[in-house]
Image (cartoon, rainbow, N blue to C red):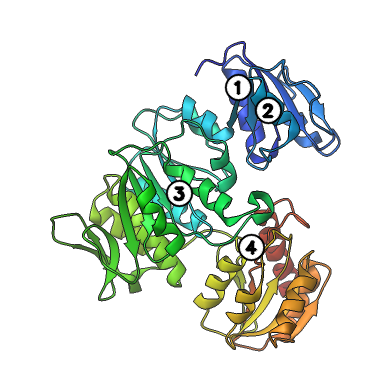
């Protein structure tokens, strides 16, 4: 992709903004940055870009987009904004940061999407490839923009990439050699409007694949496995419940890999995994499929499965205070993720939940308590909505708070020795925090403050 002297408008700075500008400048592009935030709100990012000759349009959107050759959209930017429509009408190339990275990168992409489990599966898959001594970059929605490693990667590199539905909306040529859809349940309906639109965005992950490529699908999730009929690539199912002619599944408590016409091969026992819960078993099955069909041997896969201890902000044990365990699951940004976390716990739970409203309903979350959740601490813009749903379903043990500090104190007050205080918000973080990572770190700071105060 030739970028020299191209007039490029980068829309939205966010996590991928700085590396996107860096890469474009290195390629000789003439860059303008647009963000609805003002200069004061973006002063740290602008300072980081101060060595470059970059123009800025801040506090709103550009009035005239016809002067640009390319628009590069950050993942959080809705694609239905009027000025983006105007750019389309004028034949201007519109790409996301992921598409730009793909066009500039020599390496092969392994792409992972799904409503839940993306980060754990991406981290685990990356660890398998890294431990097998492959040139590996773990990038995407996991926190390292793909564009930041695109020029560094050689043709032998594996780009293990977590991709969101937002990123997949703006792809054009992006074609992973191996893709995975882990599961599909309602999420981001405030952005996608309907489940059909959301599923279509997820399915974009394999739209450019060919018969020589692979797509790994969760056979236990109906919405996901229904997509098997819509791809031209080779389907590799994974399942906790069933076996197939080809795929990765559980047999007599073992994780098993099977190729067509060959005997099944045992990878390891499910009991040897260090990440708890059925949701994490599914993540391990998917990572096994991605790695095996990506050319990694069974023993290397097994070694990593047995040593991997999970990722930050995903059912992360952070402290035990006077017999009460504190777990950070800030990555639980929708009800299904929080349900999985609750089901993975074996002790009574005081749940801290609430955050930005993405249009989700919370009935299934409350129904999943099944006597495990003793008390719920609620904060953020969805607090009232969750409380009303809980009361309608007969769960009345709720406390409303205004801050994470108060949430942690109240949760500890409600607990006894042997309980678990679980932060699993079932909502996005953007009403109170910059990101789920920011929320998780603040939770950990609040727990540490509590520990010091006792």
Q: Nearer the viewer, mark 2 or mark 1?
A: 2
Q: Looking at the image, is mark 1 or mark 3 earlier in the sequence?
A: 1
Mark linked to residue 112: 3
Q: Is residue 268 left or right of residue 64?
A: left
Q: Nearer the viewer, mark 4 or mark 2?
A: 2
Q: Is residue 171 among the parts visible in the rendering?
A: yes
Query: Residue beneath label 1, please?
Result: 24
Q: Position of residue 53 (x, y in %)?
A: 72, 17
Element under label 4?
Answer: loop
* Mark 2–mark 3 distance (CA, rounded to whole Å): 25 Å
Q: Position of residue 290 (x, y in %)?
A: 34, 50
Q: Looking at the image, is mark 2 or mark 1 earlier in the sequence?
A: 2
Query: Residue beneath label 4, please?
Result: 330
Tags 4 and 1 touching, CB below 8 Å: no
Q: Is residue 186 above or below residue 411?
A: above
Q: Nearer the viewer, mark 4 or mark 3?
A: 3
Query: Residue beneath label 2, please?
Result: 10
Element under label 2?
Answer: strand
Q: Looking at the image, is mark 4 or mark 2 earlier in the sequence?
A: 2
Tags 4 and 2 touching, CB below 8 Å: no
Q: Looking at the image, is mark 2 or mark 3 earlier in the sequence?
A: 2
Q: Is residue 454 among the parts visible in the rendering?
A: no
Residue 86: quadrant of the picture: top right
Residue 182: quadrant of the picture: bottom left
Q: Is residue 23 left or right of residue 58?
A: left
Element under label 3?
Answer: strand
Tell me which residue sits at (50%, 75%) in the image.
Answer: 344
């Amino acid at each position: 992709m030739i970028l020299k002297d191209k007039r490029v408008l980068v829309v939205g700075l966010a996590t991928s903004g700085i590396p996107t500008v860096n890469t474009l400048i290195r390629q000789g592009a003439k860059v303008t940055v647009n963000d609805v935030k003002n200069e004061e709100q973006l002063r740290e990012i602008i300072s980081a870009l101060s060595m470059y000759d970059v123009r800025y349009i801040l506090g709103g959107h550009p009035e005239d987009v016809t002067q640009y050759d390319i628009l590069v959209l950050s993942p959080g930017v809705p694609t239905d904004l009027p000025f983006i429509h105007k750019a389309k009408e004028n034949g201007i190339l519109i790409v996301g940061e992921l598409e730009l990275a793909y066009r500039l990168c020599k390496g092969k992409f392994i792409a992972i999407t799904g409503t839940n489990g993306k980060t754990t599966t991406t981290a685990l898959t990356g660890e398998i490839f890294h431990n097998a001594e492959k040139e590996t970059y773990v990038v995407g929605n996991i926190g390292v923009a793909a564009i930041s490693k695109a020029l560094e990667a050689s043709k032998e590199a594996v780009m293990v990439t977590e991709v969101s539905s937002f990123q997949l909306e703006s792809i054009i040529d992006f074609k992973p050699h191996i893709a995975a859809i882990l599961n599909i349940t309602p999420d981001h309906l405030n952005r996608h409007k309907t489940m059909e639109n959301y599923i279509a965005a997820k399915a974009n992950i394999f739209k450019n694949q060919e018969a020589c490529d692979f797509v790994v699908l969760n056979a236990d999730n109906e919405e996901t496995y229904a997509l098997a009929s819509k791809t031209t690539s080779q389907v590799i199912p994974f399942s906790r419940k069933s076996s197939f002619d080809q795929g990765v599944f559980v047999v007599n408590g073992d994780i098993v890999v099977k190729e067509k016409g060959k005997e099944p091969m045992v990878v390891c026992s499910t009991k040897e995994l260090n990440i708890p819960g059925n949701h994490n078993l599914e993540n391990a099955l998917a990572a096994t499929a991605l790695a095996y069909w990506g050319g990694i041997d069974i023993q290397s896969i097994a070694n990593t499965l047995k040593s991997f201890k999970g990722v930050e902000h995903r059912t992360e044990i952070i402290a035990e205070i006077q017999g009460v365990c504190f777990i950070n699951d800030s990555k639980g940004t929708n009800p299904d993720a929080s349900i999985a976390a609750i089901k993975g716990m074996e002790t009574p739970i005081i749940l801290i939940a609430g955050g930005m409203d993405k249009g989700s309903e919370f009935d299934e979350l409350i129904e999943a308590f099944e006597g495990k959740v003793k008390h719920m601490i609620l904060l953020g813009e969805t607090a009232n909505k969750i409380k009303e749903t809980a009361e309608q379903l007969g769960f009345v043990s709720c406390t409303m708070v205004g801050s994470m500090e108060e949430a942690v104190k109240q949760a500890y007050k409600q607990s006894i020795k042997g309980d678990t205080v679980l932060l699993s918000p079932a909502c996005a973080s953007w009403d109170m925090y910059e990101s789920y990572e920011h929320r998780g770190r603040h939770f950990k700071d609040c727990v540490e403050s509590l520990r010091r105060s006792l």
